[in-house]
Image: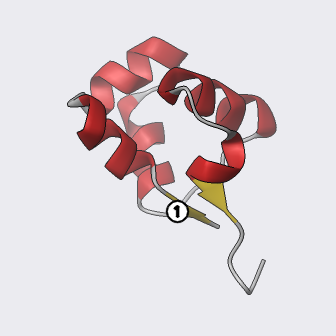
Amino acid sequence: MKNTVKVERAILDITQQQLADAIGVSRNTINSIESGKYVPSTVLALKIARHFGKPVDVIFQLDDND
């Protein structure tokens, strides 16, 4: 699964820690999502998308292998 979390953070000029605090997870979780090591739950993906004010499928996209 691909995602644009890092790009969206840059647009808002917020750190991983600021995003993590806003949605109630650890900074390490955000780092793992951005690096593709962790696929977020549906609830977490929805929280991230809501924080950025965008639909989930704009932030997260399936790879051909998914």
Classed neighbour count for the residue bearing mark 1: other residues with Cα under 10 Å, few (<14), some (14–19), many (≥20): few
Q: Quadrant of residue 17?
A: top left
Going by the image, does 10 lie left or right of 7? Answer: left
Going by the image, does 60 lie left or right of 9? Answer: right
Query: Residue at 44% across / 13% down in the picture?
Result: 22
Going by the image, does 27 lie left or right of 54? Answer: left
- Which residue type carries mark 1? Lys
Q: Along the line of sight, which residue is nearer the eye, 35 or 11?
A: 11
- Residue 32 horizontal/vertical position (percent): 46, 52
- Residue 21 horizontal/vertical position (percent): 40, 14
Vertical arrangement, residue 52 with respect to residue 23, above or below: below
Going by the image, does 40 lie left or right of 36? Answer: right
Q: Quadrant of the N terminus?
A: bottom right
Q: Along the line of sight, which residue is nearer the eye, 56 or 30?
A: 56
- Residue 53 horizontal/vertical position (percent): 55, 26
Q: Along the line of sight, which residue is nearer the eye, 20 or 60?
A: 60
Q: Mark 1 points at which residue?
A: 37
Query: Residue at 27% across / 38% down in the picture?
Result: 11
